Image: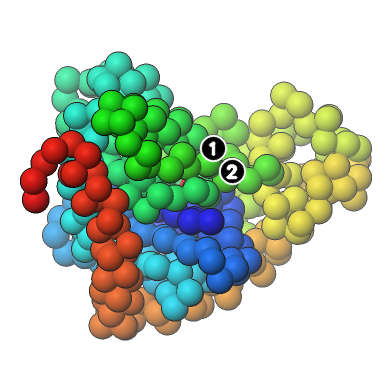
Amino acid sequence: MRVLSGIQPTGNLHLGNYLGAIRNWVRMQDEMDSESQCFFFLADMHSITVHEGREQRIRNVRDMAAALVAAGIDPDRSVLFNQARVPAHAELCWLLNGTARIGWLNRMTQFKDKVGKDREGASIGLFVYPVLQAADILLYNATHVPVGEDQKQHLELARDIATKFNTDFGVDLFTMPAPIIPKESARIMSLRDGTAKMSKSDPSDMSRINLTDDDDAIMQKVKKAKTDPEPLPETAEGLAGRAEASNLVGIFATLSGATPDAICADFAGKGFGAFKPALGELLVETLRPIRERFLQLRTDDAALDAILDKGAAKAASAAEPTLRAAYDAMGLMR
Ligand code: TYM
């Protein structure tokens, strides 16, 4: 089993990232046997699709490394690195650009969502973004890729690219990666709009819970979260058509480990005035230890850089055989 996943180091780690992906990363790392390996990385090469100044970009990478370690990624057991330190990602991406089709990329919903009406003004990097993502995954022959629901289409593209490359060059080089998507928290929604996903790019900070939010801020955000005037139903079925209510019950269920049905049974007939403080408490208790570790880790840049350097060296040697075989399959002499 080869587990691999990445996160863009832009802005803060938020509850959507944590419940949709990072918790699963930590779980898979902790359950790993001696034959398996986990690779987790900061997708800083992907983050160039959003303009950022030099100093801020450097800070963002270190902060995201600190956040992942704080959340439970152990750099001694998992390979933790940033893409820019491992040039094999960019190299394989270029090779795969010969295999990926424009028509496939045109179908990517994230690209369409991000560019909106200004397609002509979007960077080429944003368009080929999923090819770099395919390179990230295929380089390590990842078998399991823990991600939130929004990355499912990119994973399918990686499989299409892998299949076409293997077929075109008559090799059995790339392994088919499978997405690992959590059941309850595959898509954590905005606290302000139950139809939009919680995201670091949402202009309203009230829409998301950040890892850096203190206890009061978390409570405030939960109390101000949009809901409806109906009481909680007896079963989760009664949440149909109630996007905001369903999101909050989903978050509660994920954090507590109980099913949405059990949560509804507990709060049946009660309004959100009773439910929200309990949810806020649960969030505060879950996030406080992570925040405290994060704030401490981010003060030591040298230690964070050392973790990323060590991770990059391991990643580069794990990637090298696949990269070499890809050049060779294509008849490119290195
Ligand atoms: P990114 O940085 O947007 O998000 C990191 C992870 O968090 C998940 N996620 C969510 N899950 C549930 N609810 C939400 N509201 C929510 N928001 C984010 C994402 O699904 C993701 O798993 N393209 C990727 C980074 C990447 C990558 C890779 C991932 C680059 N290469 C290779 C896997 C494998 C991204 O931008 O994730």
Q: Which residue is more in the foreground, 62 or 180?
A: 180
Give the colour scheme of this rendering: rainbow
The crowding category of the residue bearing disc 2, from other C-alpha atoms within 10 Å (few below 14, some 14 to 19, many at least 20), is many
Residue 79 visible to an observer of this rendering: yes
Instruction: Name which residue lies at 24% across and 43% down.
Output: 326
Q: Are marks 2 and 1 in contact (CB under 8 Å)?
A: yes
Q: Is residue 210 above or below residue 95?
A: below
Residue 301 placement: quadrant: bottom left
Name the secondary structure under disc 1: helix
| Residue at disc 1, CB closer than 8 Å to ligand 1 | yes
* Left or right of residue 29: residue 102: left
Instruction: Name which residue lies at 21% across and 63% down.
Output: 85
Q: Position of residue 110 (x, y in %)?
A: 38, 30
* Left or right of residue 113: residue 33: right
Q: Which residue is mark 1?
A: 149
Say which mark, if any, is on residue 115.
none
Instruction: Name which residue lies at 44% across and 78% down.
Output: 76
Residue 244 placement: quadrant: top right
Say which mark, if any, is on residue 181.
2
* Left or right of residue 29: residue 7: left
Residue 130 visible to an observer of this rendering: no
Q: Residue furthest front?
A: 170
Which mark sits nearer the N-terminus, 2 or 1?
1
Instruction: Name which residue lies at 36% across and 59% down.
Output: 41
The crowding category of the residue bearing disc 1, from other C-alpha atoms within 10 Å (few below 14, some 14 to 19, many at least 20), is some
Q: Which residue is more in the foreground, 296 or 99?
A: 99
User: As shown in the figure, which amino acid type bears the numbered disc 2?
Assistant: Ile
Name the secondary structure under disc 2: loop
Q: Which residue is more in the foreground, 207 or 251?
A: 251
* Left or right of residue 251: residue 8: left
